[in-house]
Image (spheres, helix red, strand yellow):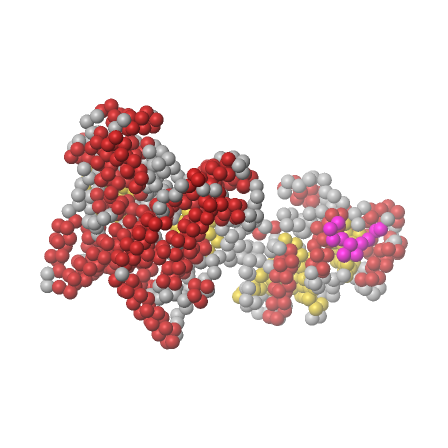
Amino acid sequence: MNFTARPHECVGDPRAGGKAEQLAMLAAGGLPVPDWFLVWPGAADLMLRRLGRSPALGTRLPDEVRQQLARLGDPDQSFAVRSSAPGEDGASSSFAGQYRSCLQVSASQVLPAIAQVLASADGRDIETYRRQRGLNKQAATPAVIVQRMVAARAAGVAFSADPVSGRRGITVISAVGGIGDKLVNGERQGDCWQVDRQDRIIAYQPEVPGARPVLSDDEVLEVAVLARRCAALAGCPQDIEWALEGKLLWLLQSRAITTLKNARDPDGRVAIWDNSNIVESFSGITGPLTFSVARTAYSHAYRNFMRVLGVSEKTIAGCPGLFDEMLGLIHGRVYYNLINWYRLLAMIPGFRFNRGFMEQMMGVGETLPAGALPAVKEPGIVGRFRGAVSLVRICLRLVAGLLVHRRAVRRFHARLETVLAPLPLAQLSAEELIDVYQSLQQEVIPSWRTPLANDLYCMIFHGALRKASTSWLGPDSARLDNLLVRGAEGLISTEPARQLQALAALVRGKPALIKLLGSDNRYEIRARIGALPALAQAIDAYLERFGDRCVGELKLESKTLRDDPLPLFRAIASLADMPAQKAQAPQANWQGDFTGILRAFVGHPLRRIVFRLLAGQARARIRDRENLRFERTRVYGRVRALFVELGRRLENTGILERANDVFYLEAEELVRFVRGSGTHADLRSLVRQRRYEYRQWHEQEAPPRRFMSIGVVGHPDALETIETPAEPAAGDMRTAIACSPGVVTGRVRVVKDPRTDRVEPGDIVVAEQTDPGWITVFPLVTALIVERGSLLSHSAIVARELGIPAVVGLADACNWLRDGDLVEVDGKRGTVQRKVAEELAA
């Protein structure tokens, strides 16, 4: 039999053990590994049995072993004899220090050294090590490496990543003079260095203060490069042993840093995720189809918008990934990638002026942590001049755009009417449905610059109005903007409330019909409504106009009112059961409030003019924002209808089990499947995998409102909470964002889902968040308390227009308050006071 093997013969042979395979791989990769050979497992035992254990053992080596030793060096050469067991120096278990290693071994002592290595494999330490790590108790006989011993003037260890912090960008090096056995065994600490990715020595700690370093700076950097090369070849952070022989650097061995195998990289890119405002559009778990459509829409729309603002193509191209990663899907929930939003804003000159306005509009409660904001290089004189010119140019564009903005809004609405003209979807083939979807993208996304421009104007004027109120009317006047921005004519978000009241008037005084509408018997309801032509026509008109306006209306997987009109029927029944006078939505006296505020500018005519302009523009832009958001709802309704119809086609042909399985696929996957350019042909298995993944997310606790990720976002340990849970406020008074004035006292109803939770007339509704689909609830309530939201969120705008006192941003409101609690809501001061038992008795 062959007793030995050369390094290249060990590759791919599991008998060689982990250390031999690693050394062979490193040598094949061009790294400076001293020559060696391997004694196969069992061969060493066989040699020992054949030759006996006499004092002349070393002189009776088999010829094969003697030839291998001669190949490694001259007769006076010494050797290192080490084990190479299965799993040794592996990624999960290194077995570091568990087997015996013999250094400075002469040729005559190689066989006794092999015997010592083999004997260590049967030791109690190995058994304990394997048991603690859940490995097989019976250790396999190791192979033995015999390697040329380097005559080291310095030696040591190096970690390609900091083993303590886990930072992949820091290389840690320890060195001692001579061979490094005492350093490896922990008997000495050695001189220590830290080197960063830019090959800068960032830390040095001598073993003996004041002593000359063992290595020069150049030698330290050379060792650092060697450690990184090992990590690059192995594909994971490495712990290496090295030695300097004269000026030659040798790699003695390399193993994985097992403690970092599954650890995240603290040097990874930091992202801040926040869903303060987007939760109004995409609440809770959001499906792959919805997210893929939204991600594409955001990417293309904002890229086009930057062009409209005059941002150069070079600047846009210089931000790879920014536009495609403005949104993230974390555990099935949609979040803003805040840092990318700030990067987007920083592309526009005047970043420091408009940042606060953006945070206010997006509902961002806190600014980013120190150091998380994108670094903005301080420009020189030329850079400042160019920045000023760019800022002036963009301001002129914005002013010019504002002059024609009303016309642009009208054109946008007209364009959408054309694009969303009725189509016989049931008569279209799968290919034609995809054609319509792609045509919709090409027609709508480029023209989305009008809603985005309106959002920018809304951000600017609403922010400027708040600043003007504070500066000119005193610091206590910041909340006046809630009065100033009411009363915009043509606000479509309040139209459903008026139509609901009209529908309720048609059934008021008909107790049997009201009871039926409040039930779950949709078939009997439909039959009864069909017998009342006026009511049927009015309901059909409502569904034709607002049938896509539902809870989670932008989530394609949501059931619309067209799919399930029961929430509409219940709202009609509840309103009809109220006296006619109470059922009418209160009208806010915005004109009287505004006139009263303007009296404060007596003697300041210029301020009065500017203030009127700011208030008028803020009011108009908020109205347009709501109306344009409704157009977005209609677009998503058309997209939903297209993919539902496509799902039916795929179900009928057996490609999908159910039509609704399309919601578990991304839009591009469906397009490529139909076109034949996809990479996944078995859509059923893909759907099953995603169903399983989403089921897991449903069962898990949702991530917090705001958190941070470091490195690979999908890494199990990448997410890190950056919010400190607030201590419960003392007493029964809480303060949040005042967004609609008025004082109301009443009973609380905590509503999770307005489609299933019953809301009684006169309730004060408490919710985690709302969206436009809650409009069937608003006419019933006397006040609104919302955990999430901003001054420009849908709930705040509609509450102001309907004259409903509202407070938003009240953290943990759904846990603090319980059904039936008596509270006082002051929508002007932003306070909610829970009435305690003593007060009730009084």
Query: In the rendering, at what x and y percent does residue 564 appear?
Result: 36, 33
Query: In the rendering, at what x and y percent does residue 585 appear?
Result: 19, 39
Q: Is residue 386 visible?
A: yes
Question: In terms of depth relative to the viewer, which is nearer, 178 or 305?
Answer: 305
- Residue at horizontal 53%, vertical 54%? 265
Question: In terms of depth relative to the viewer, which is nearer, 380 or 487?
Answer: 487
Quarter of image, res 299 = bottom left
Residue 191 relative to residue 634: left or right: right
Question: In terms of depth relative to the viewer, which is nearer, 584 or 678?
Answer: 678
Quarter of image, res 804 = top left
Quadrant of the frame with the C terminus:
top left
Q: How many marks?
A: 0
Residue 339 lies in magenta, yes or no? no
Q: Residue furthest top?
A: 512
On screen, residue 133 above or below 38: above
- Residue at horizontal 72%, vertical 53%? 21
Residue 295 relative to residue 526: left or right: right
Quarter of image, res 508 = top left
Q: Is residue 556 visible?
A: no
Question: In terms of depth relative to the viewer, which is nearer, 31 or 756?
Answer: 756
Query: In the rendering, at what x and y percent does residue 128 appear?
Result: 66, 42
Residue 302 relative to residue 77: left or right: left
On screen, residue 375 above or below 789: below
- Residue at horizontal 75%, vertical 49%? 13
Residue 10 lies in magenta, yes or no? yes
- Residue at horizontal 70%, vertical 56%? 25
On screen, residue 314 above or below 430: below
Q: Residue furthest bottom?
A: 381
Residues drawn in magenta: 2-13
Query: In the rendering, at what x and y percent does residue 559 appear?
Result: 38, 37
